[in-house]
Amino acid sequence: MGWWSAYFLAKLILYGMGYLDFHPWLNLAFAVFAALPPRNARQQLTKNLLAVPMGVVLLYHDSWLPPFVQAAAQLQNLRALSPEYLWELAGRLISWKLLLELAAMLALYSLVSRKLRMSTFAFLGIIGVMVAPHVKVWPGASPAQAAAAPSQVALATAPINLSPDALNTRLQQFYAAQRKIRVRFPRGAAEDAPFDILILHVCSLAWDDLRALRLAPDPLLGHFDVVLTHFNSAASYSGPAAIRLLRGTCGQTPESQLYDPADEGCFVMDGLQGAGFEPHWLMNHDGHFGNFFGDVHDRGGLSAPLEDNTGATPAQQAFDGTPVYSDYSVLSRWWARRQTNPAPRLALYYNTISLHDGNHVLGAGHPDSSYGARFMLLSSDISRFLEELRASGRHVIVVLIAEHGAALDGGRGQIQGLREIPTEAIARVPVALALVNAVRPAQVAQEKVDAPLSYPAVSELLSRLIGSSPFDKPVTSLDTYSNALPQADFVAENNGTTVVQVGTQYMMRSPDGAWSSLK
Ligand SMILES: [Zn+2]
């Protein structure tokens, strides 16, 4: 087998460390081919000519990189990225530590291989990967379990079925239950004090990003009355996140249906318009990347014209070289226009990419473009805008909701900053709600809702606030609004990859339909 044993042993070690997947049958077949003894030099050459491309393809298949067809489709988007950002991504793809480790392994291999037949170890390793899932380990019952009532024991130790069939069924049941969800917005009573609803959709912000950089959420979320701590964005890219939010009066749909016409009554902005709110649309970018404009307008059903933002102050240069305008500048200019608009109730969808990976802050010298610096900038812009809303004296409900995380921690199978696999670290995002100019007693604490929620919960919250205006009476507790919101299990999708929470585990279904566990 020669140096091919080094190929298999290196892959087995990388698999053990969690850097690679390992398809045992394909690898076994390839190992048998690699072990065939050539009869002459010609056969040797032919074998190597075949084996090298096969080895490369198999390595790609075993890697966590997106399937080749999908990667090729992404090239279209890659062309739009600025060269600086591409270089930055390439640097992250190559881990110098990993390269050094591989070099050390090869050196060790060449030493040991003189004494031992390494191909035997390669075959043993591959067979070990095949056999491992079938070895049953019987854990002894803990004293606590032994003392518990029989029914509790059954619950606590009932094995969760993680077979592909059981997981597929679980997913089907999830979507079947979600299909029944419909939230309706009532019309506020004529005598109610009117208010506006401002939805601020923030790209690239997850709880995990704040944790990874040890950023306190307070500079941003401290200004809000309610924070949802376990919200699932169900997506890891901007387009699907926007469609899901804008279709959030209905339950979660499979990603493949996001691009089909929406079911009746699923469009949030249509629903709000029916409840008397004039729809508006604003962004701090032009929305051309990844056809975000089309996702909001066509798939998300937001028919209001996109407002011109080009008079605002540019604050950053985006990852694709286009301008990103200052959030405060864009929002406050819009608010000035709103105050001259006679409509009593108005609903705004605002989208910001100020936190997106690869953006550069504009300014003299060497401005700080780090995520942390841009998070502080966004926080101060939003708090300044909230102050301005307060000063206007108008009643406003502001909903801040993140699209998906920035994947700052990378994690298994992902390049830092790229988001192919919609993990919990990417899809668990902050959502917060502020009641601007509501009468609230001094020193009332921010309310935290820890239940697992998704978009219908936000629609339900808005529906309750419209049905019983919080601006007509002093609001001491928001419990009546935030209690018993519709809950949902964690299911997130991106480009055909699905991540499902099962108990305390996260299971991933690849685009080819195979299930694996995310550690
Ligand atoms: Zn985004």
Image (spheres, rainbow, N blue to C red):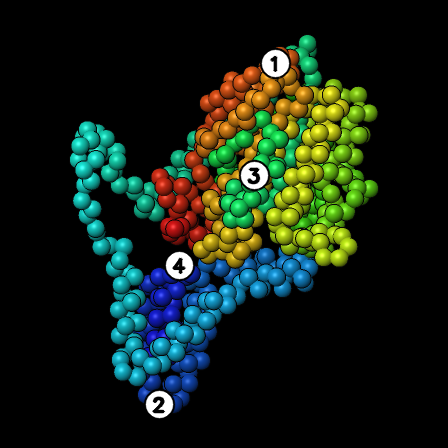
Q: Mark 3 near mark 4, Cβ–Cβ under 8 Å?
A: no
Above or below 473: residue 302: below
Res 434 visible: yes
Quadrant in the picture for residue 277: top right
Nearer the observer, disc 2 or disc 3? 3
The span from disc 2 to disc 3 (Cα, nearest Å) is 68 Å
Gap in Å between the C-alphas at discs 1 and 4? 54 Å
Residue at image mark 3: 217
Q: Earlier in the sequence, mark 1 or mark 2?
A: 2
Disc nearer the start of the sequence (4/2): 4
Q: Nearer the viewer, mark 1 or mark 4?
A: 1
As drawn, 12 above or below 424: below
Quick check: marks 4 and 2 in contact, CB under 8 Å?
A: no
User: Where is mark 1, residue-wise?
Assistant: 474
Residue 115 at x, y percent in the picture: 27, 83
What residue is shown with label 4? 18
* SS state under label 2: loop
Please say whether residue 493 is visible from this viewpoint: no
In the rendered image, the vertical position of residue 235 relative to residue 246, given as above or below: below
Label 3 or label 4, whichever comes before in sequence order: 4
